[in-house]
Image (cartoon, coloured by chain):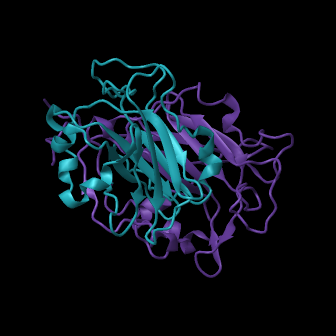
Chain colours: A purple, B cyan
Amino acid sequence: MTDPAPYRRPYRDTQPPYLFPPYASTVKRAPTQPLVALSHTLSELTAPIFGYGDIKPADNDLTQQHKGEPLGERIVVSGRVLDENSRPLPGILIEIWQANAAGRYNHRVDQHDAPLDPNFTGAGRVLTDTEGRYRFLTIRPGEYPWRNHYNAWRPAHIHFSLFGPAIVQRLITQMYFPGDPLLEYDPMFTCVPDQKARSRLISTFDWETTQPEFALGYRFDIVLRGREATPMENRR
Amino acid sequence: MSLRGTTSQTIGPYLRIGLEWMVIEDLAPQGVAGERVRIEGRVLDGDGKPVNDAAVEIWQANSRGKYASPEDAQSKPLEQSFRGYGRALTDDAGAFRFRTIKPGRVPGPAGKLQAPHITVTIFMRGLLKQLQTRIYFPDDPANADDPVLNLIPAERRDTLIAKRRADSEFEWDVVLQGNNETVFFDF
């Protein structure tokens, strides 16, 4: 019996390490023992399926979740979800969350002295369409301070969580904005050794999805792991 | 054309905002076949302190050993009301809990059956990419021949085997560092 084809290993330096001391919280949370290499079995090659029963059509509009409109600059964030073999991935659940325009999260542990916005929760979700496309309407999140080091500020970002057809494709990442001066000082961004891999986390300004007199468009494509072309021998 | 996978980033401390809507701690509503089990545990950091901002996600087959995924081509029955996916966000004690059913055996390398197990994916502030591991059940005779358990040095294997607290109650902790550090996979 031939084993099913596994997913490709990440390209060198395109993923962060577990231990990255400039991001202080990794020090007590990164594993210290060697990881055990795992061949992909059916348990790794499958993943849960989500559908229109799980979300509401308006869940991708973060500006319409309360009575009034949130403060801040409206933006359209859209893109495609593909795998490393350039195959568009339909029906992918994307969950996002973010700070409000003032750089404050609607969360009890966020003590930053910036105002909460009663009209902004900062959470959204969507399923990709048959071409792997998704779209959110939200407001541009603010930068905010954190206590990792002296005068530490996070660049503006939106958190993304995605499920692929296989559990080994599960991805949580952050989308950044072009031209943000804080990026080069941010250990969460600089933890990725490969500069090109880092820069792919920065969305691009997009005229095509910019809506006249309404909202600027930003494009962010996401690539999940792809399968090896042919079934491989069990690599154990 | 080949693309490169998007880089992982930490889930950060505010995961609850985005992920709480789909917390699923009870995976198996009434009528789902199989042995009912309750699994509880804590996530502990390198100082033994509880991690109160982790997401623990589980993925498992049904009691017949079939995944509710189109990628599973086995001709075994699916159950409409069993998705096999659970998500818990740890509380102030670092604790998480799931009620589910014990999964059946699924094929592993060369079609050889694996022992019943649950795949676990863990995210938290301070983790730049997820950890992946497995929960196995104690006293299951299939554990001895399990192809994945046997990859693990014998002295660390127990970290993947839940402890039985009562008839159908199990404890399984995630220890990030130090003695009894949980085995995580390079997947």
Q: How many marks?
A: 0
**Residue furthest front as drawn:** B166
Q: Nearer the viewer, residue B167 or B160?
A: B167
Q: Residue at x 40, y 22 (%)?
A: B33
Decide if residue A154 is in sight here: yes
> Depth check: B169 or B107 in front?
B169
Could you tell me residue A70's position as x and y percent?
Answer: 81, 48
Q: Position of residue A136 (x, y in %)?
A: 65, 41
Quarter of the image for the N terminus of chain B: give it: top left
Place of residue A15 in the rendered image (x, y in percent of width and height, measured from the top left): 39, 59
* Above or below, comparing residue B95 to residue B179 in the picture: above
Question: Which residue sits at x=17%, y=31%?
Answer: B111
The answer to whether residue A5 is left or right of residue B172 is left
Viewer-side residue, A109 vs A233: A109
- Is A109 left or right of B22, judged from the image as shown? right
List the single residue furthest toward the right.
Answer: A68
Instruction: Examine the rendered structure and indicate whether residue A37 appears above or below residue A39.
Output: below
Which residue is found at the position 28% from the left and 35% from the top? A42
The answer to whether residue B187 is seen in the rendering is no
At a point 44% along the width and 22% down the height, the residue shown is B32
User: Residue A211: horizontal and vertical position, in percent?
Assistant: 73, 41
Relative to B35, does residue B168 appear above or below in the rendering? below
